[in-house]
């Protein structure tokens, strides 16, 4: 089995998509939980390539940047499509997920009280892009790209589930995305992970807002 270790705060945050990927693929991993006091001491931050977490250890390799971690795992475990065009589309969709995640994190950490209502009102404009793209592959009844799950699916699933906590009715006008979340979440190993104490007891964000 691979010797995988996640180095991160005790939150889901930017690492939960990787955890969902690992769980779905049947891999075990270790958690090195970093406290905020330890982080503020500066030693670990100085070692991180960009001064940020999560970190990820694969044997002798240590990576930073959450999307680089996802791509690394995808390349190793066949989660990056089989054809160059599919790989490019997977990259495109993952970049779209990243754009929305940045908006979400800016709300959570910078403008939650004042900006939440407007953010929720504007979600349809973001979700419609994913709904439209999903509809073009197997009538929206499968994955984002092709006939096999990719790292972008895990990333989108995590982000959509976060938004369903923020605004439980946010997918009501997007039947394909709503069914997509249910379908991917129901994969046996993902369902088991999402039902685990390790997932349920870990807060979504570091400031307690969700």
Image (tube, grey):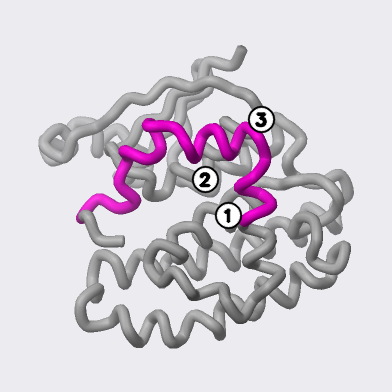
Percent x, y of residue 95 = 60, 63
Disc 2 to disc 1: CB gap under 8 Å: yes
Q: Report the Cα–Cα distance between label 1 and label 3.
A: 15 Å
Q: Report the Cα–Cα distance between label 2 and label 3.
A: 12 Å
Left or right: where 39 falls relative to 89: left
Judging by the rendered image, the residue that carries numbered circle 3 is 25
Mark 2 or mark 1: whose residue is earlier in sequence: 2
* Secondary structure at numbered mark 3: loop
The image quarter in which residue 145 lies: bottom right
* Secondary structure at numbered mark 2: helix
Residue range in magenta is: 182-207
Label ID, residue 137: none
Q: Residue at x 42, y 49 (%)?
A: 14
Is residue 196 within the magenta segment? yes
Judging by the rendered image, the residue that carries numbered circle 1 is 157
Left or right: where 207 falls relative to 80: left
Within-10-Å neighbours for mark 3: few <14, some 14–19, many 20+: few
Q: Report the Cα–Cα distance between label 2 and label 1.
A: 8 Å
- Residue 122 position (above or below residue 44): below
Q: Nearer the viewer, mark 2 or mark 1?
A: 1
Q: Nearer the viewer, residue 1 or 113?
A: 113
- Residue 128 position (above or below residue 184): below
Percent x, y of residue 159 = 50, 59
Q: Nearer the viewer, residue 118 or 176?
A: 176
Label ID, residue 17: 2
Q: Residue at x 48, y 74 (%)?
A: 169
- Residue 194 position (above or below residue 110): above
Q: Residue at x 70, y 30 (%)?
A: 76
Q: Nearer the viewer, residue 91 or 120?
A: 120
* Secondary structure at numbered mark 1: helix
Q: Residue at x 74, y 44 (%)?
A: 80
Percent x, y of residue 196 = 44, 32
């Amino acid at each position: 089995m691979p010797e995988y270790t996640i180095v991160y705060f005790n939150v889901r945050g930017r690492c939960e998509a990787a955890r969902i990927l690992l769980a779905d693929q049947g891999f075990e991993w270790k958690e090195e939980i970093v406290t905020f006091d330890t982080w503020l001491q500066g030693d670990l931050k100085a070692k991180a390539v960009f001064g940020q977490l999560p970190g990820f250890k694969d044997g002798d390799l240590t990576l930073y940047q959450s999307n680089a971690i996802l791509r690394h795992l995808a390349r190793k475990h066949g989660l990056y499509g089989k054809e160059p065009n599919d790989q490019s589309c997977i990259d495109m969709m993952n970049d779209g997920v990243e754009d929305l995640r940045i908006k979400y994190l800016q709300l959570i950490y910078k403008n939650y009280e004042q900006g939440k209502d407007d953010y929720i009102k504007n979600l349809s404009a973001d979700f419609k892009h994913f709904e439209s793209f999903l509809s073009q592959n197997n009538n929206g009844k499968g994955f984002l790209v092709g006939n096999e799950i990719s790292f972008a699916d895990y990333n989108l699933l995590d982000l959509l589930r976060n938004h369903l906590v923020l605004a439980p009715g946010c997918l009501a006008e997007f039947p394909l995305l709503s069914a997509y979340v249910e379908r991917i979440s129901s994969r046996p190993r993902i369902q088991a992970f999402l039902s685990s104490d390790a997932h349920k007891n870990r807060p979504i964000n570091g400031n307690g807002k969700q």
